[in-house]
Image (spheres, grey):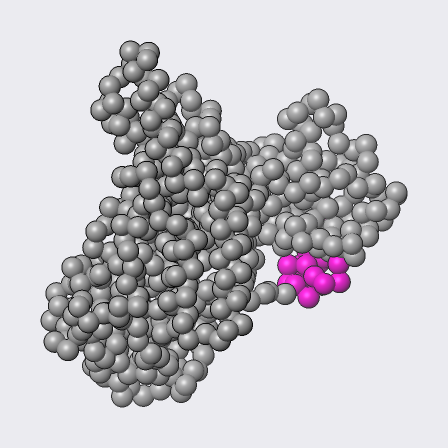
Amino acid sequence: MATEEDIAWFRSTFRPIPRPELPEDSTRARLLEVQRTAAELIKDLLKDYIWQREKFFLEFAKDDGIISLHGRTNYGDSIEDEWVIVYILRELTKRHKDIWVKVVDSDGEFLLVEAAATLPAWLEPEVADNRVWIHQGDLRIIKPKKNVKRKITEKLSFSEAKRIIQEEPDRLMKSVMIQEEAFYRLRNYPKQIPENLHSAIITIPRKVAYLLHKKPAYISPAVEAFYVRDPIALRPLRAQDASDLTFKPEDMVTVSVRFTRVGYAQLKSQEFPVPRSWAGKLPPINETKAHTRAEAGMKLSCGFEMLLYDPHHQDKSAVREMKMLLEDVEAGDEALPSDEEIDKTWDKREDDEKWMDINFQDLDQELKGKGKDKERDAGNFGDAGAQENLQRIVARFEEFLNDTSAGFDGADLDAYATDSDVDAEDSDAPSDSEEDEEASFDEAEFNQMMKEMMGMPSGSGQGPSLDTHLRNRIRDLDSDDEEDSSKQIDELSQRMEAELKGTGVLDLNRTQQKLAATKQSSKEAGGPSTADVDEDEDENVNINLAKNLMEALQGQAGTAGPAGNMLSMMNLRMPKDDRE
């Protein structure tokens, strides 16, 4: 059963702005054309694609009296499935110039989450619903009635958003900077779509190979059953005798199997003791290649066994189809593939697993652009996308620290407004001098704290008291809270201080002492001058920043901590490190 965190909602609506009075029959006919185009796009772009959980399609719906095309899918842990859908919907708006697409998931307007660092201050999550649309391939945001820089309370319903699109086009903001950030993950589409899959050669029972050859998409529910297994699902595998199993560990074949990347990582990463029914059926562990393939095949076969056995899965269409295919085999209506057929006609593809490896020792080389050297090629961490994302995070930090115009509410986007935005500006907008003084914030102080926390050189050896800064800041922002809330905030501040002290980041003289020691040792050894040392420090800022960031995140072990909290405040996200 899908959880709230797993569900993404997608809706596209058709309403031609010049003719809002179109009859319902005409609207349905027009939407039917859009639906057919969507089906054609999915067929062309996703011919061999495997969804992690559910495939995507559009169907008719009626919301607030508005006829639209509505789609809903459960993408599980595969975020790439979500972006494949966004790409298809965006392409749909390019082919049909008169449709408007709204796309959200369990996080709400997730396109805004992607572009969080570039959004205007008034665009908060509380008022973002129904403001973000895709039209003719572009991102459009519905602005408030008056141009404001501060918080707004105006919320839009679906019908109100539709009315504004039709009657108030001047309120539709189009920002190139926001759009580039929001659609950044789509920059390599559609050629990136096949890269969401992974082919591996594994050893599995012939029946499993037969099912996967009939329909490769069966791999997803089988891996899911293995990944979320419980004691009930494991019952058939605990028996000493394997005669009752549907997929017995016998008549094994070595074939190429296509997974989703997420599914393959789930299968490979989990520790799974060999069940009793499979005891002694795997090659010796010293036969590394054969053992690795057989172990992966054992996990997948157990996933298929649990999928067909567990009552929880019996209502799935894939389970019913597989049972029918196996019944045909038992009845003799269908024959299992022979070894000759597999060798001559089946695919033998095996993809590199380098994308699963992250070697933090090669971080320096990657940031310097030397990760592709032949001598170090075997040690590259992740894939090109992971390297690029890390470099973007470092660049964002550097840009943030060097931004003298950014305030507590983020960057002011007035300088980046398009011509239409400038034309729509209201003269009643408050000036900078009228901004709320309670939200003012010492940027120099914060910059110095950031540099000290990340091990970067600061301008002076003295810094503000972090405890005093946090306490004063929290009290200023929550001055209206009750006394019990104030006590809770004080307790939270103390816990934050204790956690930061444990990491050593509160020693604000640490960096200066280290630099002074370096200079002194250089003088004694006749090494480079002070200016040379300073220059080297500056050149290594990016590398030191990324190193300390990685170490801090790894030290949190997946729990909350200063590094993770700081990244969240800056709207930056890092992948979870599940390795021991």
Q: What residue range appears in magenta? A: 310-329
Vertical relation: 121 (above or below) 281: below
Vertical relation: 298 (above or below) 96: above
277 relative to 128 in the view: left or right = right
Q: Position of residue 365 (x, y in %)?
A: 38, 27
Quadrant of the frame with the N terminus: bottom right
Q: Residue 438 versus residue 171: which sits nearer the camera?
A: 438
Numbered-mark total: 0
Please report the residue visible at 26 percent of the width from the left and 70 percent of the height from the top: 436
Q: Position of residue 76 (x, y in %)?
A: 55, 57
Can residue 395 be spotted in the picture?
A: no
Please report the residue visible at 50 percent of the width from the left and 44 percent of the height from the top: 501
Q: Quadrant of residue 387?
A: top left
Q: Position of residue 24 (x, y in %)?
A: 35, 86
Please report the residue visible at 45 percent of the width from the left and 58 percent of the height from the top: 82
Vertical relation: 177 (above or below) 262: below
> Is 317 part of what is drawn in magenta?
yes
Q: Residue 499 versus residue 546: which sits nearer the camera?
A: 499
197 relative to 240 in the view: left or right = left
Magenta region's main secondary structure? helix
137 relative to 272 in the view: left or right = left
Please report the residue visible at 23 percent of the width from the left and 79 percent of the height from the top: 145
Q: Quadrant of residue 95?
A: bottom left
